[in-house]
Amino acid sequence: MTAARSTRDDAEDFDVEEVLALVKEDGANPETRSVPAPAPEGEQHGRRAAHAHHQATPWPEARVVAERAARSVPRRAPVSVPLDASLGLVLAAPLTALTDLPSFDTSAMDGWAVAGPGPWEVREDGVLAGHAEPDPLADGEAVRIATGARIPQDVTAVLRTEHGRTDDKGRLHATREVVHGQDIRPRGQECRGGDQLLPVGALVTPAVLGLAAAAGYDTLVAVPRPRAEVFVLGDELLTEGLPQDGLIRDALGPMLPPWLRALGAEVVAVRRLGDDAKALHKAISGSDADLIVTTGGTAAGPVDHVHPTLRRIGAELLVDGVQVRPGHPMLLARTKENQHLVGLPGNPLAAVSGLLTLAEPLVRVLARRAAPEPYALPLKDAVHGHPYDTRLVPVVLRADEAVPLHYNGPAMLRGVAASDALAVVPPGGARAGQELELLDVPWATAGIDVCFT
Ligand SMILES: Nc1nc2c(c(=O)[nH]1)N[C@H]1C(S)=C(S)[C@@H](COP(=O)(O)OP(=O)(O)OC[C@H]3O[C@@H](n4cnc5c(N)ncnc54)[C@H](O)[C@@H]3O)O[C@H]1N2
Ligand code: MOO
């Protein structure tokens, strides 16, 4: 490791500028400097290449097909889930208050509960939060009270500590006008028992967990997470240590499970199957997951077993190639009634592209999550386009602009690892200032603990 590297690694706060500088060094990214013109039909090798190009689904349509595929699956029965396991789920029943909130008249401040006009005789005892019902007050009486404590009967107001003083006889005087009912939160101020707090379809966020607990819930009725199995294909993949002897590290095994979970799925298994057609066939036929995600093996190489295996099991190909770069060999198939398979290309950024294009809409609809509001921002710099296909390009969002990141080649994760979103670049490219649709990466919007727990 060089001295410069180690300084960077040691820096606690890795500034965005630095990340940008890191990922915008000119000339270091030959894969994206030139527009990748598609080979004319006559130059494509083999019948499958020409066939695949012909069949490829336009990018926006591919997302719609994935949503529609998920909608065709009958809804799974709602489940009752303990609060601490509910984050990220969608409510399958309305959240209805089980009690009034607050459930008793409550002091909003530390001070004195007073009855009638002052000055008041201060009672010896005090009233704390969580204690038994206090005795009623008589007119002209006051009692020390804490925030959150029950208001004794017949109290007319709460006087804040800083707004009262006691004279030498121990009587309490208000230092400003006392308004009837001040600083008392009446029972039911926020809701009455039976009020609907949130509708079916609401996403369980940390705030929802808090509200549900406050309203008396121990469990929530929610849509179960769709169950996903990930099959990582490729004999060339190592699970630890340095790449060597033509072998490389598996980048997708570590990346996909948390990403799929952030999208709403439960990843039940990640299996590394090598380039073994039999193992793939067995794994797919034996899976009872709602969604199978494969990585690699989608193209037409000698060990690309995904298409032949899908043919062998009689799967219905819903999307066979998408007009998007990177990731155009991605596919979506119905493998069984109520089971789908998303085939992600092996190139890591191509796999991300497949995840956002096919897996995101599929999982979102199966999990009954609402579609994110589409949004667009102007581009800071021009971006090359593909002549016919959509491009997905990692960007960071800075001052209401999308700044394209380099190192966005199909085999690279360096750009996306620094990104907040992927910009949808139309065929032909986009000029500086042009507004582009953005697909957020989950950690940018929700924060790592919210979306990955
Ligand atoms: N004759 C053609 N060759 C290729 C085409 C094509 O249309 N015709 N498409 C190219 C494109 S574009 C892509 S993308 C890849 C898709 O290939 P596969 O899905 O079959 O993936 P593999 O060949 O198995 O792997 C491609 C590449 O990615 C590396 N890889 C695979 N898995 C992982 C992983 N888990 N972690 C890190 N890297 C991974 C693998 O070693 C290869 O380098 O096909 C092109 N070829
Ligand atoms: O361009 Mo391929 O589609 O992802 O590498």
Image: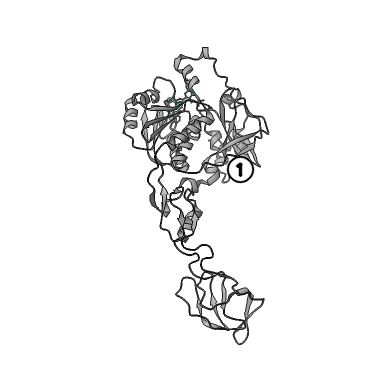
Tell me: 172 left or right of 302. right
* 352 and 286: which is toward the camera: 286
Q: Secondary structure at mark 1?
A: loop
Quickly name the residue at label 1: 15
Tell me which amino acid carries mark 1: Asp
Q: Is residue 385 visible?
A: yes
Q: Position of residue 46 (x, y in %)?
A: 45, 14
> Residue 160 falls in which quadrant of the image?
bottom right
Task: Please tell me which residue is depicted at 33% across the width and 35% down the height of the picture.
Answer: 287
The answer to whether 126 is drawn above or below residue 260 in the figure is: below
Q: Is residue 419 visible?
A: no
Tell me: 289 left or right of 402. left
Residue at the far bottom in the pictured view: 169
Query: What colour scheme was applied to this rendering of the protein?
Result: one colour
Q: Position of residue 30 (x, y in %)?
A: 58, 24
The answer to whether mark 1 is within 8 Å of ligand 1 is: no
Task: Please tell me which residue is depicted at 51% across the width and 72% down the height of the picture.
Answer: 149
Q: Position of residue 203 (x, y in %)?
A: 49, 48
Instruction: Check disc 1: other Cα within 10 Å, few if <14, some if 14-19, many if 20+.
Output: few
* 406 and 319: which is toward the camera: 319
Tell me: 429 left or right of 151. right
Residue at the far top in the pictured view: 42
The answer to whether 82 is drawn above or below residue 241 in the figure is: below
Q: Position of residue 350 (x, y in %)?
A: 50, 29
Q: Report how many numbered discs are placed on residues in the image.
A: 1
Task: Please tell me which residue is depicted at 46% across the width and 73% down the height of the picture.
Answer: 131
* 15 and 54: which is toward the camera: 54
The answer to whether 429 is drawn above or below residue 255 in the figure is: above
The answer to whether 297 is drawn above or below residue 70 in the figure is: above
